[in-house]
Image (cartoon, coloured by chain):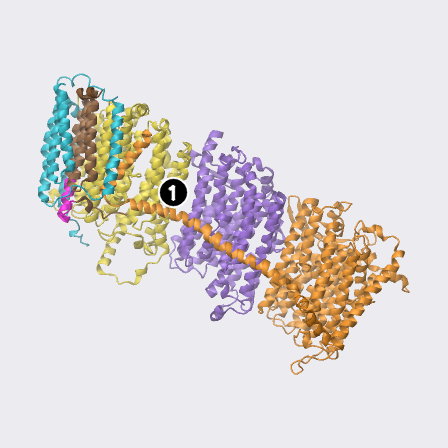
Chain colours: A cyan, B brown, C purple, D yellow, E orange
Amino acid sequence: MTAEVFLFWFLAIVTVVSALGVLFMPNPIYSAFSLIMTMIGVSALFALLGAYFLAGVQVIVYAGAVLVLFVMVMMLFDLKSEIKAFTKGTLGGVFKIGSVAVLAGLILSAIMVTTQGVAIKFQGQADFGMQPTRLLGNKLFTQYVIIFEILGALLLVVAVGAVALSRSKGGTHARRID
Amino acid sequence: MLAESISEIGLGHFLVLSMILFITGMLGVLLRKNILTVLMSIELMLNAINLSFVAYARSLNQLDGQIIVFFIMTIAAAEAGVGLALVVAVFKRFKEVNIRFFEHLKG
Amino acid sequence: MLLSQIILFPLLAAIILLIFNSKSDLLKQAALGLSLAELLLGAKLFMAFDPSTASLQLTENYSWISQFGISYSIGVDGLSFWLVLLTVFIFPIAILGSWNSINKSQKGYYASLFVLQTAMIGTFLSIDAILFYLFWELSLVPMYFIIGIWGGARRIYATVKFFIYTMAGSILMLLAMIYLILMHKELMGSYSANLLDWYKMQIPFVGGVLLTPQTLMFFAFSIAFAIKTPAFPVHTWLPDAHVEAPTAGSVLLAAVMLKMGTYGFVRWVIPLFPQAAQYWAWLFMVIGVIGIIYGALMALVQTDIKKLVAYSSVSHMGYVLMGLFALNQMGVTGALYQMLNHGISTGALFFLVGMIYERTHTRQIAHYGGLAPFMPWYTIAFLIITLSSIAVPMTNGFIGEFLILMGSYKSNPVWAYFAVIGVVLGAAYMLWMVKKVFYGPTGKELSGHKDHLVDLSAREWIILSPFIVLVFWMGLRPNDFLNYSRHSLEHWVKNQSSYTLDVKK
Amino acid sequence: MLLASAADLIVASPLFVLFMGSLTPLIVKVLNKNKEPNNFLSMIQGVGTILAALLLMVTVYFLLLSRANPFAFSNLIAVDGIAIIASTTCLLLALASLFLMRDNQSTNGDQFAELVFLTLNSVLGMLVLVMATDLLTLFVGIEVMSLALYMMIGISHEQKLSKEAAIKYFVLGSFASAILLQGIAFIYGNLGTTSITVLTEKADLLIGQSPLFAVGMIFLMIGFLFKVSLFPFHVWTADVYQGAPTPHTAFMSTAVKMASFAAFARIFVGSFLVNHDSMLNILQWIGAITIFAGNAGALVQNNLKRMLAFSSVAHSGYILMGIIVIGLGATKLGMTAVMFYLVTYSIMNMGALAMVSFLEKSYSDEISTDHIKGLAYKRPWLAGSFTVLLISLAGVPPALGFFGKFFIFTQALDQGLLWLTLWAGLGSVVGAYIYLKPIVYMYMIKDDDQNEVISEAAKDHEVYNNRKWFTKTVVLASAFTILVIGLLNTLLYHLLSARL
Amino acid sequence: MTNEYFIAIMLLSPLVGFLINGIFGRGRWGGYTSGAIATFFALTSFASAAYLVFGLTELADGPRIISATFFDWITVDELKIPARFVVDPISAIMVLVVTGVGTLIHLFSIGYMHEDRGVTKYFSYLNFFLFNMLVLVTGDSLPIMFVGWEGVGLASYLLIGFWFNDEEKATAGMKAFITNRIGDAAFIIGMFILFFHFGTLEFEKINSLVPVGPTLSWLSPLTLGTLLLFIGATGKSAQIPLYVWLPDAMAGPTPVSALIHAATMVTAGVYMIVRLSFLFAAAPYTLMVIAIIGALTVVLAATIGLAQWDIKKVLAYSTVSQLGYMFLACGVGAFGAALFHLMTHAFFKALMFLGSGSVIHGMHHEQDMRRMGGLKKYLPITYFTFLAGWLAIIGMPPFAGFFSKDEILWQSFSSSNGHWIFWAIGVLGATLTSFYMTRLMALTFWGQERFDKKHHHPHESPYSMLIPLIALAVLSIVGGWLGIPHVISEVLPAHPANVLEHWLEGSLVHPIAATAVDGGHADHAALEWGLMGLSVGLALLSAVTAYVFYIVKPEIPKLLVQKLGQAYELVFNKYYVDEIYQRYILNPLVKASEDLWLYVDVRIIDKLTYVLTDMSIGTGKMSKAMQTGNIQTYALYIVMGVAIILTIFFGV
């Protein structure tokens, strides 16, 4: 059992447990912290797969920015009275869990069949040439530049939109008719 | 076979792990009461997808998968921003984050 | 260009009326004038038509949806000739018939009538399947409005029922048409929706097996036409529509619209699917017979005059169906003649019922009684039309029924034996109604309306006299009319299993 | 290696123009000390931008036509036939939607400049989506389009319902796009690339070989099935269409559907359905059930917007038939039929919803059949146009809607989809009933409250409604188009067919 | 050419009269004006008819026929029906009877009807009837005959319901038309059978195609076709089972009863069979049926006639009974005898009807014989003319009825198609006829005056009514001399020829088997005399009995009624035939129609439509129920959808 393997299992357990935490923690704050744990775990897995740059970005963007945003919003809300984690409805729950289970079973077996058990191994080291990050940057600004640009626009859209949303006062003042 | 699959890590392991996270996220969307947690669950799903992309990138020995993940992260952030903005807007007016609150449109 | 003019002039008329100032009293006069102009075009067609040939005449052909071989292609022959003339003839009268009874949004009403006319004439003249379908469906829309806006108390129920019934049938027809377009490509190598091309196709047929193309399409078309006709199990829209429609609506529905169904059989179903038609002729003869007897029995127990007349339509159209599926010349000639007869006699009956309704505002037979002394001329007119309806010799009705029964007897005596029961029942319900309405002591309900029970006005005379003249003319000199269709019908019958139609240059 | 070649930039120029143009209302607003400028001005800026983009789009298309290579940016996007048809239509629909937004009470408030900005960017997403020849671009396009839409709905004046609609749409949309993205992941993993061109070439083979790839394809499809609202992924449609401001509903039900279907059609070009019967059957069932669920669902609605939402579901079912035809190998004919249907449907539905938007008297007004009682006698021309639109939606000739159905049915029958076509036909009979209902109310039922005392406010609303010139224009223009193109449908057909 | 004009004048002049009176006269002209116009046109018609018949006698050799083809009526495929009319020996008799009697009755009507409000209408209808009757008798093919056939039915309908304010009268008209229609329906089918057998419907052409030997099969087209035509005849000529309309038809004005329901229209059935004698003769089975039906009708109607009180009803049943004789004659192949009796019957029955009309007129529209009696002194001329009619109908020599009835009785006994049973029934009928006719005479003209003299002032009718009576009385006496049998003429001084037989020679066919018997009539002479004597004797006896019953000892009938009880009830109520028809045919039909409407139309077909609609709406409701509004439920649908699609795809 190499270190890699050990690391994988460790991280797998960490991410799954914390993901379950997201699912089960009644208090959304705890869920958020569990999610941060999952993100960090995933970022470590990225690193394990040789995607170091992504691992860094994952931590910075997700754990550092997105989740913090969540937590801040939650603080804004000041939710103390949250007791129950799940929506009511046993029958609905059974249906939901049942169909998700069926789906999970189907996908997992599809994975099993496609990867022939888990026999497909990674070929050699994760090696994309000399400097994967540089290469990444290169591709990003040449091959994928259009998407990069669009996403830039998207961020602006979201920013403007979010501001507009928060400023929208809605039906409190109807348009004057003149 | 079992021992082998424990002792050696391959694409399948990552995919299975990714699917477990995906399913967990899915359950979160389906089951959680708090809309914020639902949003987080969606983030979780996107993370799971990221993981499978990276695993595939590793398996295919391509960088493109990683670039996709990069873009997905951006989009996920944008989505989170929009989602939170909506939730805040709703909360400001109705003081409500229970997902069952949004049932006026039906039938 | 003549046929296009006949088809499109009413549409133009509708547009003219729509941009007319709706407050103007001239509206009615304008509508009448326009419909008379259309009648003139009909007269022009009468002059231009050559009765000595079976081929399609005055054809026009312009490419339309070229990628599927669909074209604007129209033409007239002996099969459609009289129906077109019937349509142009009945519209001015219908407008006169609406003169006083339609007071609400007249502009829309007359415009609807003209659109309806375009659709009806287009249906009779179309040689292209999709064009035919277009006019066929288009005719639903104005009729839907006519019943729905200017109709009686349950008009909405009736009009929606009418629309949905007809549309349900025609969807199957559309699919069959599409199938035929594709089949033409398969068999002949090019897309075509032209009927003349379709006639040349040999559509595979295996007797008795339902799932062969010919049988399936035969039924798809037949159902659409049977609903419109209306044949027995799918006739229930008709009484409702007739009862609720305004007078002119009922008239047009009975006189022309039902003919679209039977005309469909003549023009489309039987020549296109000859083997299937021959194989299943018995079924349609049975349906016809059931229609005859069933319609008559229904009419026997109706309490509403309009409903009675509506069910009598079911009975009459049963004869037409029977005559058609006798598949011999007498039967088909009779059927064609009966279509015209029914247009005239039932059309006139609806006018007559409308006139009395305008005076008394009731249609319940039980409310009437003893009208004859108050309105003697009206009674005479009613009686004449009744005689035509129950096919007394020397009226038009007799010629049609006689030929139909004879043709049916030739093809299968058993059904003729049954059908002849309808002759008796027809007399029974009509005369019973005449007795209840006109004879006996004056109805109690009428005592308040005695001042209104005035005899026919000049306008009403103008409406009725053409019908009365035609009743006797067609009854005494049927050859004057039949000569125009003779060659077409002969050709139709003689070459049934390999029917094709030439175009007269 | 250059960032991008000049050719690439030319191809992307409509997108740049659109984005830049979208900023102008915002800039004007900022320069105006963050006070809302004149709505009309903002709208004109939006309209100008759209027209410029439209012009550029067409120019670019014809420039590329001579080069015979529509691809750009490392084959991430392409301006080919589908793209040009779908994008021009989307742009025109956005134009019409802007007209509606300018007039509608729930959209023309304080944040109209932002709204124009978001609308234009949503169109930007659509353009990306329809141009996408790579799954990544496709996904990005969907996201830009959708995220902008969520916010457009969210900033409506109407409070409760539109916020709820936005949240619903957002949660479910994100959920669905997560599934779609997972699908892309599986496809990428098995295909080794995200190029749609490669995908269509190899899908047939890979579906048989790799279950995971099949799962990926199915996930990808489900993402689209959600976007174009097919059973059972259509449930959001009615709620969101109802809750959203009517101009947005018009925009969603036409432009979004157009763009999504255009992209959806692309992945079927490989005609993998020929060899995969189970996939074919699943899609046929989805189509059949959708048609019936949509039409029957509309049957029991009184709210016009909800009714039109269900009808929009049903129409998606018809279009799916065309998609199946494409999947069965009749690529060009099927694509033409689908595009034709989409164009016609967009016109009809835009007109119908414009009518609803016209009728709304305040931001919280919900138009039900009762509101249109006797409308024909108050507003004959508009009622007449609405009737034309409804009849066209019902598929009665000679209105344009009939020919859309006709081409789809023709192709479906040609591919032997007999029972599906039969079912679709029957569905359209049920459909006829629902479109007759508003006509019944407009023409055949008298308005009971004729004599009621009309309040000042109501009078004001009436006056205001009379000034909805743009909305009226949209209604009349779409009805006119329906009738004219109905007769000249061949021109449109050839126009589309020549591009595909 | 002139013949064509005269045929046209004969046919069209009543039509012109009809149109003139109908269109211009209504409400403007009084009874005398319109009556004069109508009578003038009837007379014109009679004159042309007479001219034509005279012309016919001139044509000594060759086929004696005058024909005119006006135009082709219907021409379709092999069916060619020219509008062709002929006057030949057979139709000549009818033409004369119709126009002659018709004119007389027109004349009579002027007096009888001139005060009626609708007198113009009345005369126009009468003219209309004449026109149709002439079409019927002169039409040269079955369809043309059918035109007149239905036309007279129509005229009859209109005239029976002439006083339509009385619902019963209107109903009687309707009943007549519909009952006739049943026969007509059979007639039509009969025509078809013949057409598809012979390929033509023109009489002459059929004649040339009729097979030589008799067709001895029930299912041959000949037998079936003739049978169906005969059913048509039973409708028009009021035979079992379709006779029920005729007694009710007495609701019409009395001259109408005389013209239509006694003299002319009701004999159309007989005329049709005589006209097609060549055809019926070839179908012996049909003849048998006709004879049986005829014989039964004779007795049935005669028995009913015994117990009626309404003077017109008695005459009506007597008409039915006399028509039965004619059919009996046809049935045994004695077509000439049938035609002969038709003619004489037209004279004396028209006379009696007009006489009764005169009585009714004189009694101010009283028809019940119980309130008459002793009228001979008030209405002397009427009485004497009526007396002639009475003697004729009970078959007293030398009155017309004697010769024709005797001819029939003799033929039914002697003809090869005949049988002594037919003769016996015939004699029974004659006896009964004699009884009830004497009863009628006794109750009306003889005995005590039972009417209320305060209200009734019986008076003799005007001359316009009496002249026709006298004319008909003369005809009733001399009419029979046209067909004096050989046995009688041999003993008479001048040996008068049998004019009728000579006239019809060559036009009528004898049943093929019957011709053989004609030889050796010398042997038969004694038998013929004997039978003749027997029937006359019985009739006399019966008349005397009736006289005794109703004049001498009026208490006997009352006693008999008490004794017979139920049998009398049965006869008095006309064997309950109307009630049976009502109960077992009409009521079930109406009930069935109502049920069909309620169940098939409303509960099944419409219900089915509703079920389909409800199914759609149900689906819609399901679709609606899916829309819970809950985001997570929607998400569940997505997940379930994915799961199901995957499951189906992988075929798990």
Magenta segment's dominant SS is: helix
Residue occupying the point 73% across, 66% down: E349
Element at label 1: helix
The answer to whether residue E86 is seen in the rendering is: no
- The amino acid type of the residue labelled 1 equals Gly
Residue occupying the point 11% across, 42% down: D31
Q: Is residue E9 left or right of residue C288?
A: right
Among the 4 quarters of the image, the one containing residue C394? bottom right
The answer to whether residue E539 is seen in the rendering is: yes
Q: Is residue D152 left or right of residue E369?
A: left
Relative to E448, does residue C406 appear above or below in the rendering? Answer: above
According to the picture, the residue beneath numbered tag 1 turns out to be D427
The spot of residue C141 in percent (x, y) is: 41, 49
Furthest residue to the top? A124
Mark 1 Cα shell of 10 Å, populated few (<14), some (14-19), many (≥20):
many
The spot of residue D403 in percent (x, y) is: 39, 39
As rendered, which of E476 and C264 lies closer to the eye? E476
The spot of residue A84 in percent (x, y) is: 15, 43
Q: Which residues are magenta?
A: B83-97
